[in-house]
Amino acid sequence: MSKEKFDYFIKGEKGKYEVVIGLEVHAQVLSKSKLFSGSSTKFGADPNNQVSLIDSAFPGMLPVINEECVKQAVRTGLGLNAKINNYSVFDRKNYFYADLPQGYQISQYKNPIVGEGKVLLDMPYGSKEIGIERLHLEQDAGKSIHDMDPSNTYVDLNRSGIALMEIVSKPDLRSPDEVNAYIKKLRSIMRYLGTCDGNMQEGSLRADVNVSVRKEGDTNFGTRCEIKNVNSIKFMQMAIEYEAARQVELIENGKKIDQETRLFDTKKNETRSMRSKEDAHDYRYFPDPDLLPLKLEQKLIDDLKKSLPELPDKKKERFVKEYGLNAYEANVLVSEKEISDYYEEVAKLSDKKLAATWMMGDLFAMLNDRGLDISKSPISAKHFAELVQAIKSGEISGRIAKEVFEIMVESGDNPKKIIESKGMKQQSDPKELEKMINEILSKNKDKVDQYKAGKEKLFGFFVGQVMKLSGGKANPQLTNEILKKLLKG
Amino acid sequence: MSLDKEKIKHVAKLARISVDEAKVESLTKDLNSIFKFIEQLNELNTDKVEPLTSILNQSLRSRKDEISDGKIREKILKKFS
């Protein structure tokens, strides 16, 4: 594989700058109930209908941890090749805000449930490892709704207390493209594990982005700024580009960068300071006296490890080996668990390579046009495999296959039935083809003479005539052979 | 370490406690005497001692992942009126 070179730098007047990025990803844990209460976590319910006295922080209420959320965090940690800590502690992170009724968020500060791990990215310039610093469990906050009333803010506590995994990366990312690949990889791993649905529109996956810049070749980090709560990959990329350029400009003008928290304004496409220095957060962390330390038996961790599904990296390796796909094809086909399942079903019943080509071409284009997930595909894996086989065996040509494909999408019928009822079978009988071609040649004597006189471009014209007369059903290879033979004669 | 008036006001602001300007002086004095005691404790070398998060030698108890609460919006809102 030819490798491109990494090339993302900000060009200033005084040289090139490297951009250093670290992400704190907040991933909502997939569970039925909340981290410390029995309220439902379902998205989209009536405001404040999934709130208990614990979530609304009434005095005297005690949190009890949800064992499934703990397991989900461990599974995710294992999926990130990370160290699972047998001993972890819940702390209170204190800050005052209307959608945080407790006045503190229960989080993990000193002793997180998961320690260091790593994630592999496939970049055009090769594979790159991104370090994971830690993963900890914490509560989500409620939602403040500012745009329902001109003078009041409404608070919806349905989200308050849902379990979040905060996944902190090391400052190993160097470009918006790497951020894109990293988020997609994390999302894919968690979706394979079933620990987070990764739905960015519903806010199940959001991130704080830490950005700093330094002159190319420098080994010390520059002063970083944190951009809070960005909820789409595109916005993360835009925010990084803006922020890096802003920092380079400050440096080049001899100014200092303040370490601060900034907001990304999606309408103006700029970041700006969120709060002044004297209001800087002082979270006053301390161990939550309502919660004992969380101790995990090694056996529980080992059992969870044994029950993990095959993850994308492993599956990719297997697809290359077992199905003879190239790295790019394998990468695309393992990106979502549902896509890989569909592919494997098709590959079992048809030509593996051709199946990959047609899936990544026509099937993905159709799903994309209709905004459908593969799980909602109007063509079942079995029917798709039959179509691939019909192409492979020469029963239909690639061009006709596209027509059959369209009819399959509309009707949901199996391709055999469509090919038969519409008479779309490829014409592969040499005698009949020869008859047809002779007819065409005798009708176009002038063109035949021109061809023989050296105007070889006309070959395409003859092929076109054969296709036209046969309704696209003539076997292209055979047509070429016979045409060549007869034109020589 | 000792606390000055500005620090007292800052901590009060973080906790959203309103403090009378007149009381700041006496609060500063009181808190500083507590701080003196903490400073005294700090004389002990605890470098190799893990922080004690609980005096109970137990682990966290957990619950099953079941929906057992919620749908009490009226009850909660009533408490605010």
Image (tube, coloured by chain):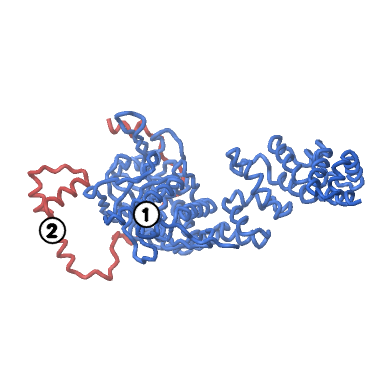
Q: Please provide percent x and percent y for residue A64.
A: 38, 49
The residue at the point 60 percent across, 57 percent down is A328
Helix, strand or loop at mark 2: loop
Asked if one can make out residue A135 in the rendered structure from this viewpoint, the answer is no
Residue nearer the viewer, A105 or A329: A329
Tag count in the figure? 2
What residue would you read off at disc 1? Answer: A210
Chain depicted in blue: A
Give the chain letter for red.
B
Residue in view at x 37 percent, y 53 percent:
A244
Q: Secondary structure at mark 1?
A: strand
Q: Residue at x 31, y 58 (%)?
A: A223
Query: What residue did someone put label 2 on?
Result: B2
The local crowd at label 2, few if under 14, some if 14 to 19, many if 20 or more residues have their Cα within 10 Å, is few
Assign the N terminus of chain A to one quadrant of the image.
bottom right
Distance in Å between CA atoms under marks 2 and 1: 34 Å
Which of the labelled discs sits on residue A36, or is there none? none
Q: In this view of the protein, which residue sits in the foreground, A51 or B66?
A: A51
Query: Seen in the image, is A409 located left or right of residue A443?
Result: left
Which amino acid lies under the numbered mark 1 shown in the image of this protein?
A: Asn
